[in-house]
Image: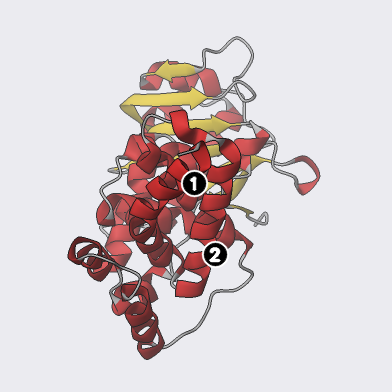
């Protein structure tokens, strides 16, 4: 048996699982088939027979393909619950064994698909992979270009939406926006005390190689150290929505060159990610807010 035949056999054993992920992400059996087919094309071209965890590799590929498809979608589909139920029945026919049918049955609730359509792509992916398919956050993070902590927050926001739970005041997007605005203002004004007050005592700031400020480590911990790193800076940063939550961006001529992604818990900033690598920025949903 040559390599391509072996890969094809391994892929077929995982097809139903991959299709369940794609269907949950995309809400359409036809688009799910397209995503799975793209994963097969990438596998056959890669010669990935030496990949230690082929299932994990394929899950990552399918997730990235679905994320790209969602982000390129210009408008969300408006379909009835009946249409989703019809698609779910079609999706169920791809399973060859009771075990595979159970995986699909657990993952294609029609009402859930309607709610998932309201989520930002990164929120949807984090929720689906973690809550439905038990993929760890440290494996999901690289797919969406975020740390495990920030990815956990994406899934948490999505979970509240899916469950219809009214978020507590600390999870209110408007409150998060106020906190980020206050942080940017304190940074520009050089107000060290105000910065410290907005930060969790154990806050961590991480920056990739393109976004690390001069003279600052790529990882800084504690409120005092992070405040020192930002005091008097961020003068050109603009408020933005990053993956559905309040953030900031440096965008000369409207093109994001650096993104500030904030994770806020209990009314305090617990993590700041500075993202400057173009390929990572390309994975983010960034909407720059107009000055008010």
SS category of the residue bearing label 2: helix
Residue 262 falls in image quadrant: top left
Residue under label 1: 61
Quadrant in which the C terminus appears = bottom right
Of the pair 23 and 258, the residue shown nearer to us: 23
Q: Earlier in the sequence, mark 2 or mark 1?
A: 2
The spot of residue 130 in percent (x, y) is 30, 49
Q: Which residue corresponds to the image point at 57% horizontal and 61% vertical from the top-left? A: 69
Q: Which residue corresponds to the image point at 62% horizontal and 40% vertical from the top-left? A: 281
The spot of residue 121 in percent (x, y) is 49, 58
SS category of the residue bearing label 1: helix
The spot of residue 230 in percent (x, y) is 54, 24
Q: Which residue corresponds to the image point at 43% horizontal and 72% vertical from the top-left? A: 27
When the figure is inspected, residue 24 is found, relative to residue 284, above or below; the finding is below
Quadrant in which the N terminus appears = top left
The spot of residue 33 in percent (x, y) is 49, 66
Res 28 visible: no
For the residues marked 2 and 1, what is the alpha-carbon distance in whole angstroms?
Answer: 13 Å
Instruction: Spot the residue most to the top.
Output: 215
Residue under label 2: 34
Colour scheme employed for the rendering of this structure:
secondary structure
When the figure is inspected, residue 24 is found, relative to residue 40, above or below; the finding is below
Q: Which residue corresponds to the image point at 39% horizontal and 57% vertical from the top-left? A: 15
Res 18 visible: yes
Of the pair 96 and 112, the residue shown nearer to us: 96
Of the pair 192 and 129, the residue shown nearer to us: 129
Residue 169 falls in image quadrant: bottom left
């Amino acid at each position: 048996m040559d390599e391509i035949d072996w890969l094809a056999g391994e892929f077929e054993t995982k097809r139903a699982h991959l299709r369940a992920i794609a269907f949950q992400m995309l809400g359409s059996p036809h688009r799910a088939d397209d995503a799975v087919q793209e994963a097969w094309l990438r596998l056959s071209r890669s010669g990935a027979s030496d990949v230690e965890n082929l299932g994990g590799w394929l899950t990552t590929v399918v997730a990235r393909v679905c994320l790209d498809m969602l982000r390129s979608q210009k408008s969300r589909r408006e379909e009835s619950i009946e249409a989703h139920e019809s698609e779910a029945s079609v999706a169920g026919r791809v399973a060859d064994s009771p075990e595979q049918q159970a995986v699909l049955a657990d993952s294609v609730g029609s009402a859930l698909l309607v709610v998932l359509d309201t989520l930002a792509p990164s929120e949807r992916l984090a929720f689906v992979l973690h809550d439905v398919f038990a993929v760890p956050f440290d494996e999901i993070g690289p797919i969406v270009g975020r740390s495990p902590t920030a990815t956990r927050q994406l899934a948490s926001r999505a979970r509240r939406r899916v469950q219809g739970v009214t978020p507590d005041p600390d999870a209110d997007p408007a409150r998060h926006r106020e906190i980020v605005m206050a942080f940017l203002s304190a940074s520009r004004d050089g107000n060290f005390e105000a910065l410290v007050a907005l930060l969790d005592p154990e806050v961590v700031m991480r920056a990739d190689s393109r976004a690390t400020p001069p003279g600052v480590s790529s990882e800084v911990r504690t409120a005092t150290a992070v405040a020192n790193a930002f005091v008097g800076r961020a003068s050109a940063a603009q408020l933005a929505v990053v993956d559905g939550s309040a953030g900031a961006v440096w965008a000369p001529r409207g093109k994001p060159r650096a993104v500030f992604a904030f994770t806020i818990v209990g009314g305090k900033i617990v993590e700041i990610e500075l993202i400057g690598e173009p390929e990572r920025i390309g994975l983010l949903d960034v909407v720059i807010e107009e000055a008010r």
